[in-house]
Amino acid sequence: MVLEIPAPSARRGALRSRGIRTLRELPPRRPQPPAPEDSPVRWERMDLDRYEVILEGATVGYIDVVGAVFVALEGTRYARAVEVLQTLDFASAVRAISPRSH
């Protein structure tokens, strides 16, 4: 019995190069600046890739940084928080967790 390994197709190579090019176009992630002093919503960096979002002194959610994506999680405890949005914009992630504040 002879097993043949199929040659890589041109289409697969084109998809891979397009995917790599797209990843390079994503914005780099840097730590977010603190919230404005007069803002009712605050965020604190908990770790390299996680922010805690606080509204009027109470935790309302978290934002995880996964590559170039901000994942908004709504809930008072991280272990029970529910994902509500994936976005490339930090402000959108904050609004998704605390819409009453904007």
Image: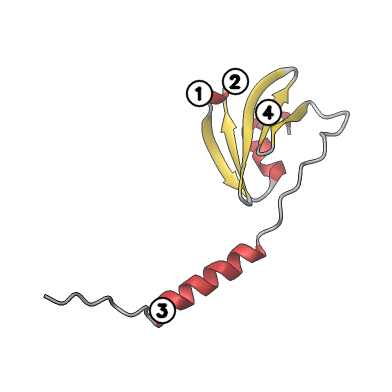
Measure the alpha-carbon separation of dots 2 and 4.
Answer: 9 Å
Give the SS element for disc 3. helix
How far separated are the C-alphas under marks 2 and 3?
46 Å
Query: Which kind of residue does numbered mark 4 sit on?
Result: Glu
Say few, some or many: other residues with alpha carbon within 10 Å of mark 1 (under 14 / 14 to 19 / 20 or more). few
Q: Earlier in the sequence, mark 1 or mark 4?
A: 4
Tag shown at residue 80: 1
What residue is disc 4 on? 52
Where residue 37 sits, quadrant-wise, is: top right
| Residue 44 numbered mark, or none | none
For the point 68% across and 36% down, the residue is 94
Where residue 4 sits: x, y (%)?
A: 23, 77
Q: Which mark is residue 11?
A: 3
The image quarter containing residue 92 is top right
Residue at 63%, 52% (x, y): give it. Answer: 68
Q: As drawn, is 57 to the left or to the right of 50?
A: right
